[in-house]
Amino acid sequence: MSFFDLRGTLKPLTSLKQFGKNPHTIRYPEVPVEASDRYRGFHFNEIEECIGCGNCATICMNESIDMIPVEGVEGDKGDSGLRPRIDYGRCCYCGLCVDVCPTGSLSLTKDYIHVSEDPDTFLFLPGIENPDANNRKTYISTKETSLNDWARIPMPELEGKERVKSFAEVVLGYNEEQARQEAERCISCGICTEVCPDHMHIPEYINAIASGNDEDAVRIIYDNNPLPELCGKVCTRRCEDVCAIATRGEPVAIRWLKRYATETADASDVIKDIVNPEIRERNGKKVGIIGAGPSGLTAAYYLALRGFDVTIYEANEKAGGMTMYGIPKYRLPLDSIQKQVDYIVSIGVKIHFNTKVGKDISFKEIYENNDAVFMGVGFPKAWTLGIDGEDAKGSMQAVNFLHMINSGEDVEVGNKVAVVGGGNVAIDAARVSRRLGAEVTILYRRRVQDMPADWEEIEGAEDEGVHIEPQAIPIKIHTDDKGNVKAIEYLKAEMVQSKDGGRPKPVAIEGSNTIMEVSAVMAAIGQQGDYDFIDKEYAEKIKIERGRFVVDKNQQTTLPRLFAGGDAANRTADAISAIADGLRACKAIDAMLMPSNK
Amino acid sequence: MKREKATTLYIGPQHPGITGNMMVRLKVEGDTIVGARTEVGYLHRAFEKLVERRNWVQSFTMMCRFCVPEPDPVEESYARAVEMLDNIEIPERAKWIRVLVLELARISSLLLWHAGQGHSLGLYTMGQWSVGDRNYILDLFEDLTGARIYHMFIWPGGVRRDFPKGFEDKVLKTMDYLEKRLEDYDNLLFENSIFQKRTQGVGYVNPEKVIEHGVVGPVLRGSGIKSDIRIDDPYEVYDKLKFEVPTQTGSDIWARALVRRVEIRQSIRIIRQVIEKIPKGDVYTKVPNPQKWKIARGDAFARTESVRGEVGMYVASDGGAKPRRVHFRGAAYVHAVTLLEEVLIGQNIADVSAIMNSLGTCPPEIER
């Protein structure tokens, strides 16, 4: 190679090509630049859609997201009231927060320059500080790109045709693999915990199930619920209504997971081995409990653990209250309740069965002989329809019917049953009647979508061949000469929008009378309390409003040392609320009688 | 000749050339280097350790930080290792998109190499042009992944998003443009007598020692050994693509430059094949909920060809929700430490930066 290389000297002069031309780098911000349609710039959050679950904060690998209370956002059921705040000193714009957002409210935008004199401006509340960024969203969450699992593992069930042949349990329960898979869907946000009347530790026990520690799950569950298998089968599960995954998919099957965990302990001594409760030494204080329903059993269990001498007085021959006598065995088998009750008895709770307060023992005796009394007496009396012919043979109350069936009595319903009502009791009575071989029609005043019963129960009833006649108002029960039910007469109703914006009301259509031949009529339009057992001298001091005991936040009634819970004190009227009442009363009684325990 | 007293000279740690923060402590006599010692530690952020407290999904966003100019092969290695561990089969289309991303990353990194190699020898126009052209590749990345530098796009299970609308056309147009520009690059750099004279015979790597050192990539190919993970141990869909692996025997900066000159053209060729042959379908196999994803006890090693050579990721799981250990091995670990210390002996101070560039120095790869 010579020292002077002509070609090698001239060729690089190709650089002159660019002489006088504009550079192709862009002079921002003089020349505006539009980022691409997928650019991962600053965050934006739809404040209204966000439920404050905090999954963005959990996934953020730089810990740059905090969930903080925000002005103008009120937390309520299904919304923690918190909203994400991004620390742009830490954020790496990976967008994982968007990919795990269950509601899809969080997104990234085209914005990538922010100028401010405020030194704290790197702490940024998306959606609140940039409300106008809504139309500049780029990196968004869709169901397809999301990291959440939207579909629930289906629950194995008996076929409708098989079910009506017996009282065998309809829901078969998850097996181990199904339970693990379902548990893996949970994002542990805890929104459910807030809504659960009993504030159960839902994310914790689901985590335990997901990691294969079923016994841990049982221990966590027993921390504040002594009847978990009952709840695992028949809970009204408001937790699932607010599940973060339910915003765009099917909620995590919280109830079925609890059922799975508790079913792994198949006898009361197994439960005792697993839970291995710490029972405090007897403190000498006595607590009387009236009614062995969910609230009474709960109060009894936790009081006994705290060293109290607990005695329950129960009118029936088995414990469980409405869950024992009101819920059909295909939903909640006897063994399920029995093993939980046996476990509660095994830690030292005494139960006097067939002991009706006011008859076998007076309220006064219980009240005066105990340091505190808890009443979980429920709503035993059914509302009647208030129509002609209701006292005919074959016309009965659905709760009484269920009570008899669950007590093992034979009830003759004939071949065609009409059930009046739209709640779970109506559905239960209908499905039980199907199992007795009758054709069943449910008459309900409003539309099917207005029925207060669980949609799963409604579907289950339809699968089993129950006919639902909506917008039907019964007006008369016809009888034959022997006084037996012969037919039920009802009017069709139309739904009229109420003027005050409330839900539409059924209004009977004149002349639409329909007569349906039936052999039995069951009324299931609600129950009420029966407080005649309380001696007059005490009854005067106990305040009752709208058929329920008035209690404070500690379940304390207006009579000192007397506490109440469950249906007779709580408008929610479901098992889990009753359990929560029992637990609250237990804590209050403990605080009242043993202040040193604190 | 009278022997002069050796002086200590520090090159770095502020970006010697455009390689990243590291330092070479030189012993020089006059202009000649008689001893060299690589000093690292200026970039150390303990990436490998940080991964151990992040779950399997969170961890993938750490991967790009192992090498800024070309993060995708690291993401690819991690994703593939995790997929091996948990037996995840990714969709066919995702494999093709991954190859496209990897090759775009190669081009982007090679353009940056053009700039670095030019800069280190005073040829500034080269750098301005190639970095300007690299922006067009970054535009493609922005369209596809949502980010220009840290793409965080290849994750366990596939890739995060499918092509946006009109992306294929844009890629082909950019490739056509780039191919024409490569002629200009030839004129500016490879035909340039200054470049030739300052690179030929400079930074000589003894071909007998390359295996001993564990040299990989263009440095190995520049020493006459044909080795490329894409051919030797094909991953994704490289076995369905036609491309050449260039070699040179000079074993100096010039030889390695010529290898890279061909490689950028081969990457364009691969990208055109990908756009032509890519099948339709999903781009992502759903992995479990990140919070609850546990991977059975075991370990896996995946390696990917980067512009600097083979990069490998060893991932071990103890059955938990987070990696027990992640160990990354990048090409620069050898090239910029043991090899560089040896190659620099006898060289001129003015060539240090050019040699570092030519060996593919990338300090964050060393300091994991």
Image: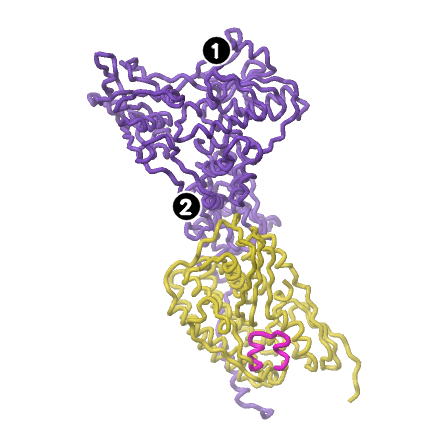
Q: Looking at this view, name the residue that lies furthest to the left.
A: A511
Residue at numbered disc 1: A533
Write down which chain is painted purple: A
Q: Residue at x 60, y 31 (%)?
A: A277
In the image, A420: left or right of A64? left
Q: Please name the residue shown 60% across and 52% down the image.
A: B53
What amino acid is at disc 2?
Ala
Mark 1 surroundings: few (<14), some (14-19) or many (≥20) residues within 10 A:
some
Find residue A151 and name its label. 2
Is residue B211 found inside the magenta-colored segment of the image? yes
Task: Specify start and end residues of the magenta stretch as a single range.
Answer: B207-224
In what quadrant of the picture does the C terminus of chain B appear?
Answer: bottom right
| Residue A87 against residue A281 in the figure, above or below | below
Image side of residue A165 versus residue A85, left or right: left
Chain drawn yellow in the picture: B
Tell how many labels.
2
| Residue closer to the observer: A496 or A543 | A543
| Amino acid at circle 1 | Phe
